[in-house]
Amino acid sequence: MQRLISTVLGVFLSISTFAQSFTVSGYLRDAESGEELLYATVSVPETSQGVNTNLYGFYSLTLPPGTYQINYSYVGYEPVTLEVELTQDITQDIELKSASLELEEVVILAENENDNITNTEVSVLSLDVSELQKVPVIFGEQDILKTLQLLPGVSASSEGSSGFFVRGGDADQNLILLDEAPLYNASHLLGFFSVFNSDALKDVKMYKGGIPAQFGGRGSSVMDARMRNGNMKEWGVSGGIGLISSRVTIEGPIVEDQGSIILSVRRTYADILAKPLLEDFDDFTLYFYDVNAKANYKLGENDRIYISGYLGRDALGTDDFGFDWGNRTLTARWNHIFNSKLFSNTSFIYSEYDYGFNIENGGIDIDLDAGIYDYNLKQDFNFYANPSNEITFGWQGIYHQFQPATFAFDDELQDAAQEQYALEGGLYLANQQKVSDRLHLNYGIRLSSFSNIGAYTEKAFNANDEVIRETTYESGEFYHTYFNMEPRFSATILLGGNQSIKGSFNRNAQYLHLLSNSTADSPTDLWIPSSSLVEPTLVDQVAVGYFKNFQNNTYKFSAEAYYKNLQNTVDYEDGAEVFGNTDIESELVFGKGRAYGIEFLLEKAKGDFTGWVSYTLSKSERQYDEIANGNWFSARQDRTHDLSFVGIYQLSTRLSLSASWVYYTGDAVTFPAGKYYIDDNLVSLYSERNADRMPDYHRLDLGATWKLNKGKSSSSDLNFSVYNAYNRKNAYSITFDTNDAGVTEATRLALFGIVPSITWNFKF
Amino acid sequence: MKSIKYIFFFILIGSTFSSCEDVIELDLDTTEPRLVIEGTLDAGNQMARVLISRSNDFYDLSGPETISGASISLQGEDGAVYTLAETSDGTYRAENVAVNPGEEVTIAVEVEGILYEAVSRVPYPVDLKEIEVAENAIETPFEDDAEGSIALSANWEDLADIENFYRIRTYLNGTFQSDSYVLLKDVFVGDGAELSIPLPERFEENSTVTLELLSTDEPYYDYFFQVSSVAGDGAGSTTPFNPVGNFSPNVLGYFGIYYASSLSIDL
């Protein structure tokens, strides 16, 4: 610890003692809304030096004294060039105007012109949220998770689902952050919708590899979604009315250019529409809603506070049966500028995910509740030492509370699994260094820790899952701690001719594990902490990539290869008894995994016709001593081929057309290799785990967006989409049973035929 | 969870579009046929029965191959040995097998030169008290083949201070409903409680329903719990595996002991 601190200080001192220089710093904002622009470019063409704005739109550029032309640019905005005479430190906030209508381009993969070539980020996907609606989606409900699934390395967990796998990793290995708050279940309606209401989002970034040191806690990916701050200049209302859901957003200044507020609400009404068809079930409910709210206020030149929250809930039930689940998060943040070179953010984050059942039967009330609750405090610092070194460092502490399924009959609590408590810590230091015009590095280290905390009675089990030892810990007692060093490294070598080679290595430790005993994700899947029995999952990933842009950055090409090694993966043993089991740890097996693949992406970023082609060739395997005789077997998400085409054609200023086509190898599944009968009932005989394949999946979606009008302050458009346009019967599940004639057969369930939809979006 | 998903499918199917189910022909792997030994001891009726067969290919139209010529014996704690006789191909029986609750019973099956053994403990008898036409039945729209509308509950009293395992076998108009599994452990519902367990099926008027409550030993329960979880179809089913019984060396099947108690109701 002490060594780490002295290293930090050493780096600071060595970097700070440069020759005399001055700093220009400030914020980049949208001229219309006052919304900060993240990852925008601030550069000095004559010296080819530059920085990007940080997650809060702040930049800091340190240069020797002199006069400079400083260029401020952001995709979709008109760039601004400013002459600055640097004889002292200067604060310079800049507002950029949105590019005029004629120049409007559809850029889904948001990046500055050639950032993909020059930055040190490898394996990162960025989305421009405002343009998402032009990609056709099911029910016309735009969804960042569904769009990410059209990109290489990110695959959907099943038809229509917003659950996803990144580079062969497991579903629980994705850190999904909404304004820094982790979301433990990012799905609504059993995965058909994601919790992300695009109206409330500003920026989304997904790290498939090369994960920066500031992020920790999950093995495979980080999805960093940032909510909008709300319009700083004027009040406005926007929203959309669709076939099965509607949404509305209100935003405006609390005090102009000082503080703003935004409230965004969405609700589905599938149950209301379905009511006439469900006469027998009068009190049938099936809906979800979510609310995003955020307020921010500038306390002065150097301080600003933000409070944001998310509340989402799914409910379904009848008059005597109910099931609901959802996330709640609260993020309170304080930005502080110590000086023109040092920016800090301090966050307190609360996050909860819980679910509950309620059944009334024969006059008895049966309740089941479960959840996970997090209290998270973190600080992040950006130190802009000089144009060649940008240092980030910080720390994080998360107090986790795990409440396993608890039953109550008529409010009388039954024998239940114990609550568990843990403290997860993180400490990191990283430097983004421009070694030369040709070589950019980003290197850092994250030290993470995880401690179990009492009160808890820890059990040890023998091979027959029987308890052989119990150890009881007092309330507040730290009884088991893991430490991990997580090195993070990425490098970019600029080759000239608008091309580059990038490479990255990262280790990520994961201390929480999602247990699922079904082949589809379910709200009741259980999160458990690492413990003396359940070791943390460690994921090491190496990735290399080649990037090239053609024709003035109109076409962007990338090829990336990765290899991922997973240690201490967790799964249920065969035949695990999950429901109501108070000793769930006795039902677990531990193994390892490997995943590797190559990804190609060709994007056309400019012109009337834009879009991309994405192709992934990959493999993902697991090995458990207790499963498949200890042989390696394909993970469920092992998809050999995964191909997507997305095209958007701006036919006129009013009309844009779009299409997307996806094809992927069917999931690895276990089909029967034989049959036998137990008590007269057919039982399938299985041979190898996941040795079979679902039929290949492919689907075409079409969309059209018609702008009804665009005034100075109001606009509206109609969005049409057709999901599964050629009515492909993609198998959602295949079941094996005996038909009425006593013959065994396989039955395919295809969930969706052609699904047309229409949505009206407005903005006042 | 499967049922939850069905609710959602049902809604979507009913409202905006149609999903579709059809029979498809798959190119399935085949595997070496495996031996299946299903051994039960009905302690109340003092009847032992063992079925020995071999698995076959999934699309094989013929029935399972029965295995004759096995020698099978049961032994209780008092040392008495009961030998089972082959009454038809692959079916072996013994009567008047006298055992008492709590007694350990060992089965030895010698087939094709290999000796398979399993041990279990005789459970305690529990009587089914009544079949109730449930008024407050949980109304769920997810029985995809729900034709009838009458919901039934099986009522009985759990034995206090003993870990009990139950299975309900359902007969509709005298026909055993082999794909219906109601399994219950008293640790989930309260030791010694008055139980009223709703059946998942709905029944039609003018039918006769017979419920057979089995108070089983733990191996029987464990085996059927595994069978019922792999038999779950649809998207929410468990990762497939072959249920493991209590025979040693391992073979498909199980040896279980139960007391049975039946009641019928005319609807």
Image (tube, coloured by chain):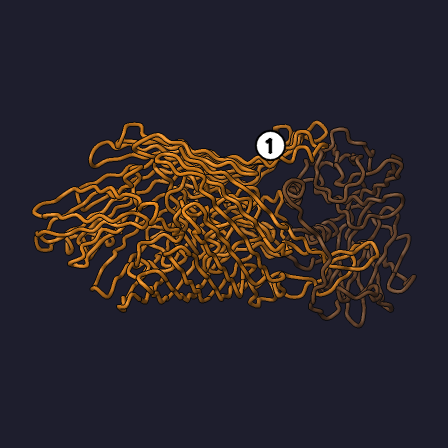
Chain colours: A orange, B brown
Question: In the image, what residue occupies the spot 46% across and 61% down?
Answer: A614
Question: In the image, what residue occupies the spot 85% across and 59% down?
Answer: B81
**Horizontal and vertical percent position of residue A597:** 46, 66
- In this orientation, which residue lies closer to the viewer: A62 or A354? A62
Can residue B246 be seen? Answer: no
- In this orientation, which residue lies closer to the viewer: A614 or A624? A614
Decide: is A605 above or below B196.
below
**Horizontal and vertical percent position of residue A577:** 63, 49
Q: Secondary structure at mark 1?
A: strand
Check the residue under mark 1 and report the chain it is in: A
Q: Quadrant of residue A430?
A: bottom left
Q: Quadrant of residue A342?
A: top left
Q: Which residue was labeled with disc 1?
A: A413
Where the C terminus of chain B falls, by quadrant? top right
**Horizontal and vertical percent position of residue A524:** 57, 43
Relative to B23, is A200 on the left or the right?
left
Relative to A50, is B251 on the left or the right?
right
**Horizontal and vertical percent position of residue A750:** 65, 53
Residue type at mark 1 is Leu
Where the N terminus of chain B falls, by quadrant? top right
- In this orientation, which residue lies closer to the viewer: A369 or B159? A369
Decide: is A252 above or below B36.
above
Relative to A625, is A385 on the left or the right?
left
- In this orientation, which residue lies closer to the viewer: B112 or A486? A486
Q: Residue furthest right?
A: B87
Can residue B29 be seen? Answer: yes
Q: How many marks?
A: 1
